[in-house]
Each structure stands twice: as C-alpha cells, then as structure tokens.
Amino acid sequence: MTAWGVVQFPGSCDERDALHACSLAGEARLIWHEDRDLGGIDAVVIPGGFSYGDYLRAGAIARFSPAMEAVAAFAAKGGPVLGICNGFQVLCESGLLPGALLLNESLRFTCRQIELVAGGADGPFTREIAAGERLSIPVKHGEGRFWAPEELLDRLEAQGQVAFRYAEGQNPNGSARDIAGVTNEAGNVLGLMPHPEHAVDPLTGSTDGLRLFAALAGAPA
Amino acid sequence: MRARVLIRPKEGILDPQGKAVERALPALGFEGVGNVHIGRLVELDAESAERLPELCEKLLANPLIEDFEIEVLEPPAR
C-alpha cells in the first residue's frame, strides 16, 4: 500500500482534502513543516493554501522550512512529489520545478471548475493519463499565471515536461502557453495549479482528480 | 548600516498591477501617464553589506522574474 505524506505549513488550507484523496489511494498522514524526517513514505504532497501567509511572494518562505529540505532530498532520490496550487508555487520557489507563478492577469481570485488537457508527461502521477485526455478539475487561486522565459518554455515542451494545459479558451490566469502543470526533468516532481484533491468524489462533480493519486498507487481510479 | 532594496518585475513580463493603475489614472484626471510598473521596496538594517546580494537572490527577489538593486544608505539610520 502506498504511504503518502502531506506537508502542512502554517497557512496551509487544503491538507485535509489532500489527505483524504491520498487515503483513497493508500494510507496518508500529515508531515508538520518542522519535521526533518519524512518517515519512510512513498510519495509526498505539498498541498494548497497560503504557507506562512504567502508574505513576500507565494511559496517564498515555505521553501526554507525543515520539511522542504527533506522533500528536496526525497525528490533528488527520485521520490514522487506532487505540488498543488500553493504547493506548486513552493516547488517553483525551491527550484524543484522550472518557472514561476505570478498574479493572475485579471488580478482576480478565480474559483471554478475547469477542463484540463493532459500533455502525456511520463511521471508517476500521470503515466496512466494519455496525451490529449481531458480532466475536469477545479482551480482556485489568485497567483497562478505560469511564466518562464521563451527558451525555457520551448525546452519544457520539447522534453515532455508540460503535464497539463488549460483547455482552449479556459486559461483562467494568463499562463504562458496555457500551461497548468509541469514536471521536473526527471519527471518525478509534478506541480499544477488546479486541485485534483478536490475532484475525488462524485458529490463535488468530478472524480478525475483521483486519477493522479491512483496512478501512483497502481490502482484503477 | 541601513540598506534599501528595490525589487521590480523584469522587463517584458506582464505586470497587471501596473496596468490596473495605468488604466485608473485617466478616470481620476491624470492624463499623459503611462508605462506604470509596480515593484517592492525593502528597507533593512544589516551588520554588513557583504551578504546582501545573496540574501536578495535567495529570498527577497525571485531572480527568474524580478530584478533587484541594493542601495546602502549612509550614514546609518538610527
């Protein structure tokens, strides 16, 4: 059974939903931000929220936490790491993922269900999701505009690191090339702005998000 | 010593805060103002200026998206 750890910072707010999603695909527990020891887990989720209040820049302070040092070491050894929303921002600030997330072009906090198109990235969370498949997953953020220099964007596309794009016409934040989620070069670290952990129960309209968690557990969603 | 760090969005990166201010100005009667960009100003006391660039690169600014300038203010502020 897959053992999941969900990192909780002061200011995290989606750790309970992440914990629930992980528990549908294994067993899950919280990792406090001061913990240096991840304790023999198989995968880590950096959940959404406003870590350390998101003062300065979203994710900028969380990267210095003891738990993030442990996550960086875990990622360097090939451990699967999933960053969602604020977790994506933290991973970009940590240098574990390329690019940066800026204020939405609209300057508005956006919260709605959205269609994603899979890019066919070959990583532990997405290997069961073929390029071109569509997933219905909610977004809720004010700083989700993915940005990277043009040459880096070219490289991400060429190397198959674009895991998800917003479906045509649905880009909620002005992200470059409609990018919603990217992986690192090795593919074991994935970050995305939409919230797969909020799409794991028919009650909330879609179970497409569960596929990311189930893929790692090797279980059908 | 007291230092002042100016952080601004890199050229070419859309700055929606600047744009929003720019669009609001004519409505308030300020014509002929454009190219507005909004950054951040950080003032701090430090024992030495030696490690300030590193501090800026690691925390105060994100070098991928922001440029920064360090200005050492003399004499030291009290």
Image (cartoon, helix red, strand yellow):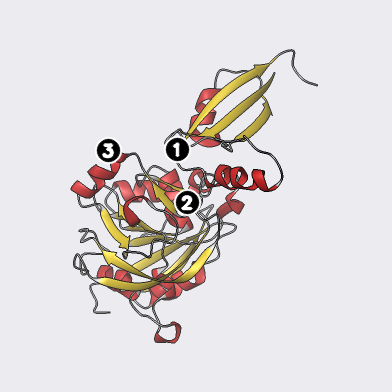
Residue B43: image quadrant is top right
Location of mark 3 (residue): A151
Q: Label 1 is placed on what type of residue?
A: Ile
Judged from this view, the residue extending furthest toward the right is: B78
At 49% from the left and 61% from the top, the residue drawn is A48
Q: Answer few, some or many: residues within 10 Å of disc 2's Cα (few below 14, many 20 plus, some between 14 and 19).
A: many
- Give the residue at mark 1: B65
What residue sits 36% from the left and 46% below the top?
A: A96
Residue A67, label in figure: 2
| Residue positioned most to the top | B75
> Measured along the vertical axis of the image, is residue B19 above or below residue B57?
below
Q: Quadrant of residue B77?
A: top right
Q: Secondary structure at mark 2?
A: helix
> How far across and down, in percent of the image, does residue A52 sit?
59, 52
Of all chains, the one bearing label 3 is A
A183 horizontally vs B71: left or right: left
Callout 3, which amino acid?
A: Glu
- Rendered location of residue B15, percent (x, y): 51, 43
Q: What amino acid type should be assigned to the residue bearing mark 2?
A: Ala
Q: Position of residue B62 (x, y in %)?
A: 48, 37
Residue furthest out toward the bottom: A203
Indicate whether A81 appears above or below B29: below
